[in-house]
Image: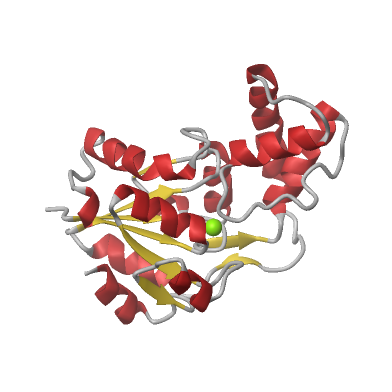
Amino acid sequence: MVTRLVLFDIDGTLVLTGGAGMRAMNRACEDLVGHGNALDGIQLAGRTDWIILQDAAARVGRELHRDLRHELRTRYVVHLREEILLPGRGIKAVMPGIREALDALSERPDVALGLVTGNFIEGARIKLEHFDLWKYFRCGAYGDDASDRNALVPIAIRRAREARVADVSPACVVVIGDTPHDIACAQAAGAVSIGVATGHYTADQLRACGAEIVFSDLSDTEAFLRAIG
Ligand SMILES: [Mg+2]
């Protein structure tokens, strides 16, 4: 019987894509608002794709109305399919210990795995399929579902229940992420937060914003499994 729902963030937590997401968003903005570097200087880490696009559009003096939102998302997905194949800049890899941790958690009958991410669902799928990680996740809440990340954990819990993957209270949900936004969305929902310092934030920064448990990375599978409970 499933008694734990474990929800992973994607960027900086499961994988880094060498900037593929940012390049794809810049290309989408270039297609539709004629600005090739609309994302320069906009904070990406831990934020939802809708909020990022809203900031990018505002920057070039455009309102992100419904049609433009949907066109930008469509173009983003098209470009991401290409960009994810490129070596990119910086780190493009699965984060340390992630495959081992997901294999071990998948074996446990008391654990269900899901995603809670600011990525649009199609973007999440493209990124994780590239690294052969999509297969591990049975439910999730995505950037399409809300622009406010703090709304996502309750949505993931509801989806898990509807899909008969897990029927658990928020206290039995663990959220794993690399930014203060991940910790905040766990706290907002009454879930347990685990910070992992493989993205833009240090272990001390994640601790300072209230992460209950913090790892520098997840390479110690045993310690991570113990933290899950
Ligand atoms: Mg992240």
Across and down, in percent, residue 15 comes to: 55, 62
Across and down, in percent, residue 92 comes to: 66, 65
Q: Quadrant of residue 155?
A: top left
Judge from the rendering whether residue 1 lies leftward or rightward of residue 121; answer left or right. Answer: left
Tell me how many marks there are: 0
Whether residue 45 is visible to the viewer of this picture, yes or no, is: yes
Tell which residue pokes out farthest to the left in this image.
1
Q: Nearer the viewer, residue 63 or 66?
A: 63
Across and down, in percent, residue 162 comes to: 24, 33
Across and down, in percent, residue 47 comes to: 57, 48
Tell which residue pokes out farthest to the top in this image.
67
- Residue 201 vs 8, above or below: the answer is below
Whether residue 84 is visible to the viewer of this picture, yes or no, is: no
**Which residue is located at x 41 percent, y 74 percent?**
214
Q: Nearer the viewer, residue 81 or 197?
A: 197
Q: Quadrant of residue 90?
A: bottom right
Colour convention of the picture: secondary structure
Q: Nearer the viewer, residue 207 or 52?
A: 207
**Which residue is located at x 20 percent, y 38 percent?**
164
- Residue 209 vs 10, above or below: the answer is below
- Residue 29 vs 180, above or below: the answer is above
**What is the quadrant of the C terminus in the image?**
bottom left
**Which residue is located at x 61 percent, y 56 percent?**
45
Judge from the rendering whether residue 170 lies leftward or rightward of residue 19; answer left or right. Answer: left
- Residue 83 vs 213, above or below: the answer is above
Judge from the rendering whether residue 167 lies leftward or rightward of residue 10; answer left or right. Answer: left
Judge from the rendering whether residue 121 lies leftward or rightward of residue 228; answer left or right. Answer: right
- Rendered-image quarter of ligand 1: bottom right
